[in-house]
């Protein structure tokens, strides 16, 4: 197991070493073309691409596909952190570069470490898992606060109300909630999303690039990298 975990990490680090910090888009794989959320996700991806952001998703169908599709239509780069599941989840056709992982926790490390902001579209348990992992890391000072934009006020407001009740109940402190919520935005307006990201994502992206160090000089897979992928 340890060897498989290390192989997952090496593969992800190699695949993503050349990309700039991304805006990662979370969302349901089950809301497909024809749903209102799919059209909104396309607009989100297109707006991110038009404003110079690389878009990262889980690489699957549904809203992940829509976000990658919108970004690709704008001419932006699209990358994906995929997960290998017991049931097959198809890879969408709008990805320039991707890595596939055996373990969810490795995938989440890759998503967060390569992200300067998150956009959260309507989603289910997987979306909540990824979202609360990030919120916990911010709460516990494991990562710097990053901009988090919830798209779909009606969908997400009940969840945010539950978090406020946790503060009232004393299970989350006011200071912790302030740290988590400091860069949060809930909106239905894509232009408001872009304004929030342009103001708040750039400083974190610059810090991430500085901490990452020099990029590798070649984009050609070495024999080691090919072995890791196998």
Image (cartoon, helix red, strand yellow):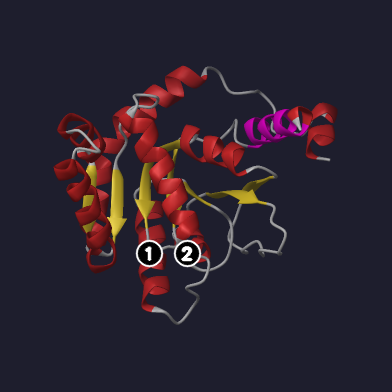
Mark 2: secondary structure: loop
The residue lying toward the viewer, choosing from 76 and 13, is 13
Mark 1: secondary structure: loop
Residue 174 falls left or right of residue 17: left
Q: Is residue 42 magenta?
A: no
Q: Position of residue 182 (x, y in %)?
A: 20, 37
Q: Position of residue 215 (x, y in %)?
A: 58, 23
Residue for badge 1: 122
| Residue lying at 64% horizontally and 51% vertically, measured from the top left | 83
Residue 84 falls left or right of residue 59: right
**Numbered range of the magenta stretch:** 4-15
Which mark is first along the chain, 1 or 2?
2
Q: CA distance from mark 2 to mark 1?
A: 6 Å
| Residue lying at 24% horizontally and 37% vertically, measured from the top left | 172
Quadrant of the frame with the N terminus: top right
Q: Position of residue 73 (x, y in %)?
A: 48, 63
Residue for badge 2: 28
**Relative to residue 150, is residue 214 depicted above or below?**
above
**CB atoms at circles 2 and 1 under 8 Å apart?**
yes
| Residue lying at 85% horizontally and 29% vertically, measured from the top left | 223
Instruction: Examine the residues drawn in magenta and state their main secondary structure.
Output: helix
Quadrant of the frame with the C terminus: top right
The residue lying toward the viewer, choosing from 8 and 76, is 8
Q: Position of residue 211 (x, y in %)?
A: 46, 18
User: Could one spot residue 119 in this view of the protein?
Assistant: yes
């Amino acid at each position: 197991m340890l060897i498989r975990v290390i192989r997952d990490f090496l593969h992800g680090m190699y695949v993503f070493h050349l990309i700039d910090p991304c805006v990662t888009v979370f969302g349901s794989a089950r809301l497909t073309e024809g749903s209102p959320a799919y059209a909104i996700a396309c607009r989100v991806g297109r707006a991110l691409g038009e404003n110079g952001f690389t878009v990262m998703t889980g690489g699957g169908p549904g809203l992940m596909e829509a976000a990658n599709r919108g970004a690709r239509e704008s001419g932006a780069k699209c990358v994906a952190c995929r997960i290998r599941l017991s049931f097959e989840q198809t890879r969408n056709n709008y990805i320039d570069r991707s890595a596939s992982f055996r373990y969810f926790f490795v995938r989440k490390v890759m998503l967060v470490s390569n992200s300067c902001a998150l956009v959260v579209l309507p989603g289910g348990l997987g979306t909540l898992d990824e979202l609360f992992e990030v919120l916990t890391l911010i709460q516990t000072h494991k990562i710097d606060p990053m901009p988090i934009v919830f798209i779909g006020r009606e969908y997400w407001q009940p969840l945010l109300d539950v978090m406020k009740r946790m503060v009232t109940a004393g299970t989350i402190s006011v200071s912790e909630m302030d740290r988590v919520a400091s860069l949060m935005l809930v909106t239905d307006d894509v232009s408001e999303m872009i304004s929030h990201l342009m103001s708040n994502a750039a400083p974190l992206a610059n810090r991430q690039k500085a901490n990452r160090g020099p990029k590798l000089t070649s984009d050609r897979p070495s024999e080691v990298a090919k072995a890791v992928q196998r």
